[in-house]
Image (cartoon, helix red, strand yellow):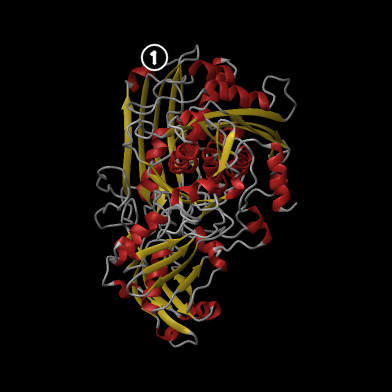
Amino acid sequence: MTLPTLLDTWRRSQARAVGSSFPRVDAIAKISGAADFVGDLSVAGMLHGKVLRSDVAHARIRRVQVEAAEQMPGVVAVLVGEDLADIDPYFGHAIRDRPIVAIDEVRFVGEPIAAVAAETEAQAEAAVLAITVEYTELPVVAGLDAALAPDAVLVHEAPTRPGFAHGLGKLPERDGNVCYRYGFERGDIDEAASLADIVIERDYDFPAVYQYSMETHAVIARHDGAEISLWANCQHPFLVRAEIAMLFGFPVDRVRVVVPFLGGGFGSKSYTKMEPIAVALARKAGRAVKIVNRVDESMVTTRRHNMKCRMRTMATKEGRLLGRQVELWLDTGAYADNGPRVTATAGDAAPGPYRWPSVKVQAHCVYTNTGPSGSYRAFGATHLQWIGESQIDEIARLVGVDPLEFRRRNLLRPGEEVRPGGRPLDADLIGDVEKAAAAIGWGRERIANRGLGISVGLLAAGAHPVSTASVRMDADGGVIVLVGSTEMGQGTRTVMAQIAAEVLAMDPTRVAVHGTDTRFTPYDRSTGASRSTTVAGKAVELAARKVLDALLETAEAFFETSERRELKADDGRIWCRGSSVAYAELIAKRFGFVGGELRGHGEVRPQQGSGSFAEGPVFWEVCVAGAEIELDRDTGAVRVLQTSSIADVGRAINPQLIERQDEGGALQGIGNALFEEMLYTDDGVLLNDTLLDYRIPATEDVPEKMTCIIVENGDGPGPFGAKGCGEGVLAALPAAIVN
């Protein structure tokens, strides 16, 4: 079916832009191959870069010999740590601990030591193989137990330096290999234990997993001495711009970051990753350089944290929850990356969405000699919901109460406090879990070797509510939306077009949404934490309303009326007392000739006064799922037969996109629950760094039935009462499968 046919079908079936499953605006470009990703791009004079990576987990670097590589055909530049002596070469938005290339010491297998720029990719690869490194190996702490041992070698000896955008207040001093701590306590946990009839205490291990987006990390960098330009598949282009400017001593306006089509992220492309090494190599070469990671290289660039956790949950014999005590340790690898924020989020998620008289949480972020850990969809919440919901089911069985009924008795209600001083609960969790349970047949007669499970949680979503947007209506009535939120497959461009079209009462096909280019696109803090529709979408709505105001103002003069309530926008026209005028005609009247344009600027910031974005979090994302599984008792193999998930979105801008987001998240949840795990040796070597060895869900793992239930209450702070979605199912489904 062609795009015109899709759009004709949509027009016949829909009356409004918002609330309809408008076809993706980028669908044809992607499926036809017309969409350009970073790997497809080329700029004038571009070289190809390859990175030499450490093959040991911890060592002093005695010598890096590059002379042979420099003499090889096509080689233009070889970058080593000594080339960075004129700058402060350490980056990291939370803790500034990661060198562009290793300086004096390597801390994980895969750490960049040198990089080569050559005329062809093959020449660069050959030159990398010609570089030799002499090491003095050091003791390795390749896991949490080793890193936390009293006599453990330190991964970092230098004092902690806060990153430029950590947003976590004063960072604590490092304690051994613990680089960050977070905790809180309410009530009296010892009293809760003394009153409890039931105490469940367990130790848990959660494996490291890889985000595995379809596209690996890729970047083109150009450094001409006056400006730095980047074409990068990054989720946070404005934060990358700021960090690159800081690293290389440039004003922010002299750094440009362009994000073309992006093949998935799931957090793997959050913050700064390969951009610094590409810029440094381009600086030395004096020409643009492209670096595209292989899968194995991306797997040592970022991953999700593995975790150890001790959880104790206390309840009465009647089934009333009394308290929960949690201590957890997250393995952030050799460099902090987003570890401190993941640690804080995991700590916040530890109690779960229940009514607790007493809670005590202690969370620790730990350095080890493994690849750095960063963000992954629903970070922090997935770890703790799996553990917490397992204990909730265990207590329900001991009490002799149906797990669904047990949750009805103990879950928070709408308007109740989730955490002191924060946003009250803005969702009906009991209603949501009842819907998820019903969808998988909860309460029906059980079938042999099959099981049903449910899971409920909350994710603090909408982080950093700072977004701006620009909406421009051209002389012919067409609209261009400029917004800095990154489209990485989730449908952002489509949703932004629908929001603008709804405000302006026009056909979404007349709205074009342009991708991120920090030179031209208005500022957006980041793409993550389910914030794009809620925060960036609100900025688009506000900008579009200013354009509509200008149209209505001009229409008042056109219709000779001072009563704005007589005016109505519909189908690309302003109507008044049965007559109408096209937007293009109003623009011509406003400017006195054919030409001119209307512009609107929208911004969202925490201090806007309404309180919608000032409270933390911006909204609570519901993490509710159900699963039916089948167990082969001979082999122990588990097959997921069906799943259900709740998308509590306030207002569904595009229902089909919501359903597809939840289906994708459910498949990731199946992989997390059943077979995904990054396996390290005691020497810090990643064993399964290819698709052959790292098992992700395949076609045969797709459940027979996947149900996404969209809940609309119009209670979100985003456009038309919307809230974000897409992460909750990944947090919830592994726990539902376990249960």
Left or right position of 563 against 576 = left
Task: Pick the quarter of the image with the C terminus.
Answer: top right
Q: Residue furthest top?
A: 318
Give percent across and percent down for residue 628: 68, 31
**Amino acid bearing label 1:** Leu
Q: Which quarter of the picture shows residue 673?
A: top right
Depth order, front residue of 76/538: 538
Depth order, front residue of 175/698: 698
Left or right position of 429 against 3 = left
- Residue drawn at point x = 58 percent, y = 63 percent: 36
Give percent across and percent down for residue 505: 56, 39
Residue 379 visible in the shown view: no
Q: Residue furthest front?
A: 560
Give percent across and percent down for residue 25: 61, 51
Q: Which quarter of the picture shows residue 181?
A: top left
512 to 285, vertically: above or below: above
Give percent across and percent down for residue 335: 37, 55
- Residue drawn at point x = 52 percent, y = 34 percent: 386
Residue 433 visible in the shown view: yes
Depth order, front residue of 453/27: 27
**Mark 1, residue position:** 195
| Count of marks placed on residues | 1
The kind of secondary structure element at disc 1 is: helix
Depth order, front residue of 547/534: 547
